[in-house]
Structure formats: C-alpha cells, structure tokens
Amino acid sequence: MSQLTIKVNGQTVHGNSREPLLNQLEKAGLQPEFQCRNGMCGACRCKLKAGAVNQDDVMAFVAPNEVLACSSVPKSNLEIEFDYLLAENPLADQQAANS
C-alpha cells in the first residue's frame, strides 16, 4: 500500500508507505518536535492509536503503543497523537505546489 491516510491529533493528512512519518508530516504542513531525526533523542515520540509502522532500532525510550516519527515508516493507515498541539508550516503548501 503506497498511499495511505494519517490522522494526527484529529487532523487527516495523506501519506505513503515509503518515507519516515516525520518527513511526511512536515510535507503535509505540520511541525512535530524533533532534534535528531535518527531515534536518539525521543523528541518526536507519539502515541500509535491505530495502524502499524515499521520502526528502525532506536536508542530513545519508547513505551508500549508509542513510536518515534523520525524512525517509523507507516505500513497501513495510521492514527497517531502527539501530547502537544502541532504547529503548522504555512510554507509547506507553497513548497509542495512548486515541486
């Protein structure tokens, strides 16, 4: 399944099964917190409410039903939740239109 739906804190965006979740959320105009992009810091930790991901080995602590957005590639439609309100990147729509 290449194209899929990602529900983030109640907002639905389109995604795929090829790229890390963090990249996809940024392309959709959302700005999850992150510091490292390689599973070391845990700043991009989110709750996996529904669906499945392939997650690389990570150094940061991940509790049951949590994933790191930087190291997880969706395998199916997802529902995830961050413990904070995600900022939106107004330039993402413009960048997507130009690519």
Image: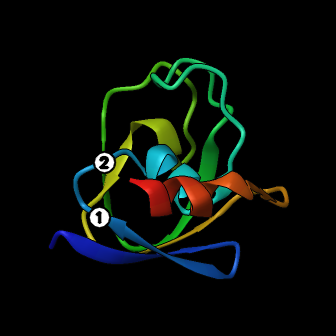
Q: Residues within 10 Å of mark 1 (few under 14, many from 20)?
A: some
Residue 65's place in the image compared with 69, above or below, is below
Which residue sits at x=38%, y=53%?
Answer: 99
Which residue sits at x=72%, y=39%?
Answer: 33
Q: Residues within 10 Å of mark 2 (few under 14, many from 20)?
A: some
Identify the image quadrant of the N terminus: bottom left
Question: Would you identify the image quadrant in which residue 51 lies?
Answer: bottom left
Q: Nearer the viewer, residue 84 or 2?
A: 2
As drawn, the residue found furthest toward the front would be: 98
Type of amino acid under label 1: Asn
Question: Would you identify the image quadrant in which residue 42 lies?
Answer: top right
Relative to 7, 17 lies left or right: left
On residue 61, the disc is: none
Query: Measured from the top left, where is residue 27 in percent x and y?
Result: 51, 54
On residue 16, the disc is: 1
Residue 20's place in the image compared with 43, above or below, is below
On residue 19, the disc is: 2
Q: Secondary structure at mark 2?
A: loop
Query: Measured from the top left, where is residue 41 in percent x and y?
Result: 62, 21
Type of amino acid under label 2: Glu
Query: Measured from the top left, where is residue 53 in percent x and y?
Result: 32, 56
Q: Are marks 2 and 1 in contact (CB under 8 Å)?
A: yes
Residue 58's place in the image compared with 70, above or below, is above
Relative to 95, 73 lies left or right: left
